[in-house]
Amino acid sequence: MSLDVTALRQQFPILKTQIDGKPLVYLDNAATTQKPQAVIDALVEFYTTCNANVHRGSHYLSDEATRRYEKARTTVASFIHANAKEEVIWTSGTTESLNIIAHGLAQQLQPGDEVLITEMEHHANLVTWQQACIKTGAKLVVIPINEAGELEVARFEAALNTQTRLVAFPHVSNALGTINPINELTAMAKKVGALVSIDGAQGIAHGGVDVQAIGCDFYSFSGHKLFGPTGIGCLWGRQQVLEDWPVWQTGGEMIADVEYQNTTFGALPNRLEAGTPNIAGAIGMAAAIDWFAALDQHAIQTHEKALLARANELAADMPGMRLIGTAKHKVGIMSFLLDGTHPADIGFILDRQGIAIRTGDNCAQPLMKRLKIPGTARASFSIYNTIEEVEAFFNALKKAQTMLA
Ligand SMILES: *Cc1c(COP(=O)(O)O)cnc(C)c1O
């Protein structure tokens, strides 16, 4: 069965937006996805019918809020095939998840230890490990990519050794669209006993994440790139590893017993979740996952592939267009440069025509420097985009090219 994109689009109120009389063409999905009515309703419903603080257990609303909040955790746990819901830690997003991992591991890192990352990291997975290495004296090893934007897997394998404490890589690159062979990379890292942390900010929205099958130790993601709200995300980590770690932040909710001079901290997941959490966000994120998981996964994948294939076809016919990231396995992310133009000018002219793309360094400055480019223009497609929108994007690009010539 093919995807009914028209029906799908009707679930996203924002897609009806007109910009200067032109229909919005939203192609900035790698920055954040739009939200279906089901998610908007879940947020409104929570605040309208059961807003209260969680874990207080002192009245009806609090019990109801707690029930929904913990049910949301179970939804996330089963979506990614976690062993237990206690392994799902709520965070404000991928960035915070990665910082918690780095905070935990930094206590164990020493000079001589190595942390492996890749040339394609988002700043969130680069600066975080770079700073942890600076603090501890561990060595940050950066694995190169090839001209197509694929990780040099043989170089990755060769770099692994008994000093490798952790490897950290993205499931999918936000700048290049490359899908990394995460199972293979994880298996290689496990042979030398390293921990494996996967930045799933982009990968999660493409479905089928099974942390048990991958065999990694941590998988981090944000709600807002998965059709959910901003300000909420998850850190999934293996229970044995997370339990071992010092607490991240201190305060209410995360304690078992407090005296003036001493505190016994609580068990997972609360031990890593200090203070009043983003209750509505967690419920909204679970609504997004329920909504997403109910879609025909095969149909949405076929549709996404068709969007990228059409874009590639049109790009091949576009004089002076240089694609940045041409990996064999990639998602619907198209970063590019147009000869003789600056990405920011392209973005500006497209915006005048109602077309939203991203321009700049894609939160990956070292990668841009490595590719010797100032940045890119980036169109990123989601399941609600249409072939007609891809075509409108290229028509607008042609217009921009003429205007800027
Ligand atoms: C967006 C993104 C992040 C950061 O996610 P936040 O939601 O901003 O915390 C990290 N890595 C990748 C690959 C991303 O695309």
Image: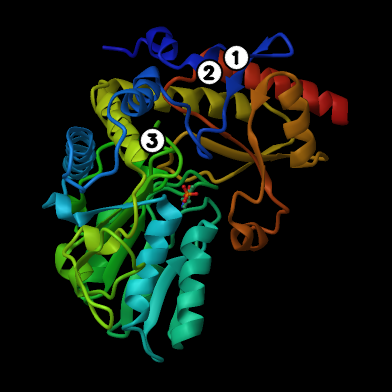
Q: Which corner quadrant of the image does residue 253 belong to? A: bottom left
How many angstroms separate mark 2 from mark 1 (CA)?
Answer: 6 Å
**How many numbered marks are there?**
3
**Residue at numbered disc 2:** 14
Disc on the earlier residue, 2 or 3: 2
* Residue at figure coordinates x 41%, y 27% from the top left: 305
Q: Is residue 88 left or right of residue 277?
A: left
Name the kind of residue labelled 3 in the image.
Leu
233, 378: nearer the viewer:
233
Q: Which residue is mark 3?
A: 226
Hey, what amino acid is under mark 1? Answer: Thr
For disc 1, the marked residue is: 17
Separation of marks 3 and 1 at Cα, in angstroms: 21 Å
Q: Given contact means CB atoms under 8 Å apart, are the residues at marks 2 and 1 in contact? A: yes
Secondary structure of the residue carrying tag 3 is loop
Does the Cβ of the disc 3 residue fall within 8 Å of ligand 1? no
The image quadrant where one finds the N terminus is: top left
- The quarter in which the C terminus is drawn is top right
- Residue 11 seen by the camera: yes
Picture residue at 40% right of the left edge, 61% below the top: 98
- Element type where label 2 sits in the image: helix
